[in-house]
Image (spheres, rainbow, N blue to C red):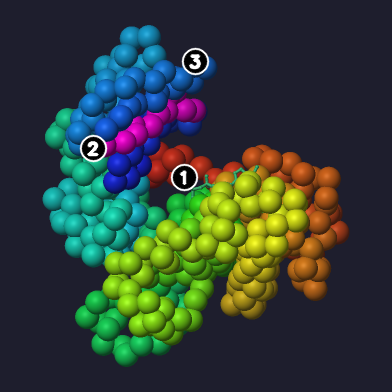
Amino acid sequence: MKVLVINCGSSSLKYQLFDMTDESVLAKGLVERIGIEGSRIKHTKTGQDTVIKNMPIPDHKVGIKATLDALLDKDHGALGSLDELHAVGHRVVHGGEKFSSSVVVNKEVLEAIEECVPLAPLHNPANLMGIKAMMELLPETPQVAVFDTAFHQTMPKHAYMYGVPYHYYEEYKTRRYGFHGTSHYYVAYRAAEILGKPVEDLKIVTCHLGNGSSITAVDGGKSVDTSLGFGTVPGVIMGTRCGEIDPTVVLYLMEKENLDTKLMSHILHKESGILGISGISSDMRDVEEAAEGGNERAKLALDMLCYGIRKHIGAYAAAMNGLDAIVFTAGIGENSSLVREKVLEELSFLGIKVDYEKNKSRGKEVIISTEDSKVVAMVVPTNEELVIAKDTLELTK
Ligand code: ADP
């Protein structure tokens, strides 16, 4: 049974085709620069070299058509015909309070995703374009929406409310939603499998550290708190996003520099974080290299990130009244032994002991704490696409 997973951004589209009989990836690819000069599709059939085709891709519908053509290609494709496609799963960033799990797309679901556009004005419209284009091209094939926010819908109200007048929540739904839910869900449940214990019995902090980062408290398999919020800037410092900040700083800067909301938003989302502090790059590899070379601001960015992660782990251990495991995932979490080491070393009060040899590993599932460590620290590479494929199959069986 073949399931296609689509992750549609504003100018790009990633896809993976799964054979769900063994959950293997048959092909994957990326459509880049949709609606921009120089658009192209990069397609890889498992076991073959990547093929790149430059072609005009003015909109998402053409991008989806190019994806289907690549999958049907007789040399590099992985589908004999589109009838082999059982269903399509779409990543949708924001499901607001409407969606606490994945759903089969119908007219009402499309409308509800549309209603969430004000909450994710950059992402939901692109996700919708992908779904609608696919529905037009494959009207008979079921489409499933999997939401980044859904896993966090289990947070208790005292964790998701902000301390502004209550009526703003009622009128505008201003609250913590959280993101990267599919990733936190996957690594928490996988960690429980690796530990050989029911997830219901575990208190886990999952650290998704990529260009965007979030940390989540997963108690008994449910998200009970998470570091991203209404939007995607709070929590720890990220590639270009500022992380936790006193909102009066924002008001003060707007006044001092005469900034409008658009410019201020740009600064908080695109010029801050690791880039803004280091002045070098948003990419952790560059920053680690510069810090090793003695660059003080690169060192500061690294220290701020690791301190922020540590603070969240401590806070979430308190929130859950206990801690069994810490899981690292995404680009930085899976690859940076330096970040993991700096975070864990100063959590020794929790009884955590790092296995330095195992911590050198990159991009693989591995326990990086010693056998006598009171809390297990581990790396679990995330696999959001597999979660989307599994949910898609489950809902369309
Ligand atoms: P996104 O949020 O865009 O999906 P990723 O999960 O791919 O991002 O993470 C990107 C981040 O991972 C970048 O900061 C990158 O520098 C970092 N990263 C990737 N490989 C390494 C590595 N070997 N060492 C340190 N950081 C790394």
Classed neighbour count for the residue bearing mark 1: other residues with Cα under 10 Å, few (<14), some (14–19), many (≥20): many
Q: Where does the magenta region start and end?
A: 24-36
Q: Residue at x 45, y 61 (%)?
A: 271
Classed neighbour count for the residue bearing mark 3: other residues with Cα under 10 Å, few (<14), some (14–19), many (≥20): few
Horizontal side, residue 87 vs residue 275: left or right: left
Q: Earlier in the sequence, mark 1 or mark 3?
A: 3
Q: Vertically, is 308 above or below 169?
A: above
Q: Amino acid at mark 2?
A: Gly
Percent x, y of residue 251: 38, 82
Q: Vertically, is 225 above or below 376?
A: below
Q: Residue at x 17, y 30 (%)?
A: 137
Horizontal side, residue 346 vs residue 164: left or right: right
**Residue 211 visible in the displayed image:** yes
Residue 35's mark?
A: 2
The quarter of the picture where the C terminus appears is top left
Percent x, y of residue 353: 82, 60
Residue 384's mark?
A: 1
Q: Which residue is mark 3?
A: 48
**Residue 200 visible in the displayed image:** no
